[in-house]
Structure formats: C-alpha cells, structure tokens
Amino acid sequence: MTIATRHRGPASSGNGGWTAGALAAYLAPGPARVVLRSPPPLEVPLDVVRDDDGGVTASRGGVLVGRAGPAPEPPGAVEPVDAATAREAGTRYPGLTSHPFPSCFSCGTDRAAGDGLRIFPGRVAEDAGGRVRVAATWTPGADVDLPTTWAALDCVGGWAGDLEERLMVLGSMSADVRDLPRAGEEHVVVGGARGTDGRKTFTASSLHAADGRLLATAAHVWFAVDPKDFA
C-alpha cells in the first residue's frame, strides 16, 4: 500500500481519512474502525499484514502506521440538512480565511477542482450544549472509491470540533459505508461535535445522496498536536 502525495493531509503525511479508508478496503464489507499510530508517510510502500483476528496492520521499517479491524456496530448518523442549506454553509467555511493544512486532500483550499475534494464545511447549527454542526456539498469525481469516501467523511468532523481553536490530527476513525457516492452528483456531508476530553476531540459525520439517502456514517477521535511538528 502506497499513499500518493495527492492524498496528503498535512504537507508531509497522508490524509487520515484516506489512509484509514485504504486500510479498511482490506477488510470484508461492513463497519470498520481504524487507529492511526504515526503520521502516514507519502510515496513509500507500507507493509500490510493480515492479523489472525481478521484485522490488518500497516507499517514502515518496523514503525506501526495504523491498524484496521471490524467495528462492532455502525456509527450513528448526524442530523442532515438539505443541499441548499449545505451549499450556503460552505460560503462561511472558516478555512477560506485561515487553514492549518491548505493542501489537505479533503478540505484544502489550495487544491484545484478534480485534484482535492474541496469539501468546505460551514456552521449550520449549535445546540443548547454548545455542540456545533457543520455542512457542505460535495460532487465526487469519476475516481471515487472507498478511501475517497472515507476522506470525504474525515475533515468535516474536524471542522465541527475545535479545529479553529487548536491544531489537531485524526487519531482514530470508524465508518460504515453502505453505498459509494455517485460520480458527478451533488452530495451533502454533515459533521457534528461530540465533546472533548483533554487532548481528545470527538466528532461524527454523515454522507447523504442527492435524494437524501444516507450513504455513510463515521465517528472520529482527534488529538491536539504541537503546531511546530507540522510547520
């Protein structure tokens, strides 16, 4: 397994969602959970080994990059919004003003259409407990696949969390992709905050088809990191 530079998140490492989805693709269909242990390196082969319990691990030079295995149940869905609301929310995307990883495959503002996914989530609601919900539209290209779908479910969670306040990267992600999105059709991605605990931020996301069908759900755990490590 090799992570192409195109599929980066931070400038020098793989997008967490795409990497997690690429590992999940080695498993049988169904809900999966992926834990990332170190920054996924770009443009180098990773050794992927199947474990006795049906999971897989990816490593490079003896350094564990991540592990994927079946999840006991699918993540819960985030309350949806219609496409018009999601489209309008994208105009308020905080990353348009300040972005920690502008070259990110999923949400980077420096990526051209057809290169990155350009999913730009903006705030649509905040509940009584202060938990934020964000949304964006996304039109997949012809190369849409399972890793790309996981990537689409990734950063929308971060922007629902506290990415505006502190730098953080994906530590683990669970997802259940019921159906792949259809190329050339507009979809809606929503993300929801689920709380914090020290360095950890918990979020969730959902992907909906143009007709409102729920295609996929995800849950994330993010870890705050030192900005100097990603300079």
Image: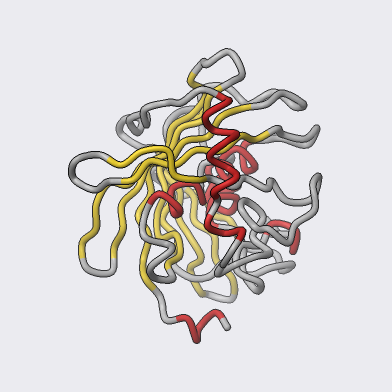
Instruction: Say above or below: 219 vs 161.
Output: above
Tell me the quarter of the picture where residue 125 sits. Answer: top left
Q: Is residue 110 above or below residue 138?
A: below
Q: Give the image location of residue 48, x and y in percent.
A: 58, 56
Camera-side residue: 115 or 110? 110
Q: How many marks?
A: 0
Q: Position of residue 73 (x, y in %)?
A: 31, 30
Q: Quadrant of the C terminus?
A: bottom right
For the point 75% across and 27% down, the residue is 183
Please tell me whether residue 154 is drawn above or below residue 175 in the rendered image.
below
Q: From the viewer's perspective, is residue 114 above or below residue 73?
A: below
- Display colour scheme: secondary structure
Question: In the rendering, at what x and y percent does residue 164 appear?
Answer: 43, 63
Q: Quadrant of the N terminus?
A: bottom right
Q: Residue at x 58, y 39 (%)?
A: 25
Depth check, front residue: 86 or 11? 86
Query: In front: 143, or 40?
Result: 143
Give percent across and percent down for residue 11: 66, 72
Give the residue displayed 57% in from the left and 26% down from the top.
Answer: 84
In the picture, measured across the screen, residue 115 lies left or right of residue 51, that is right
Identified at 61% across, 27% down, the residue is 187
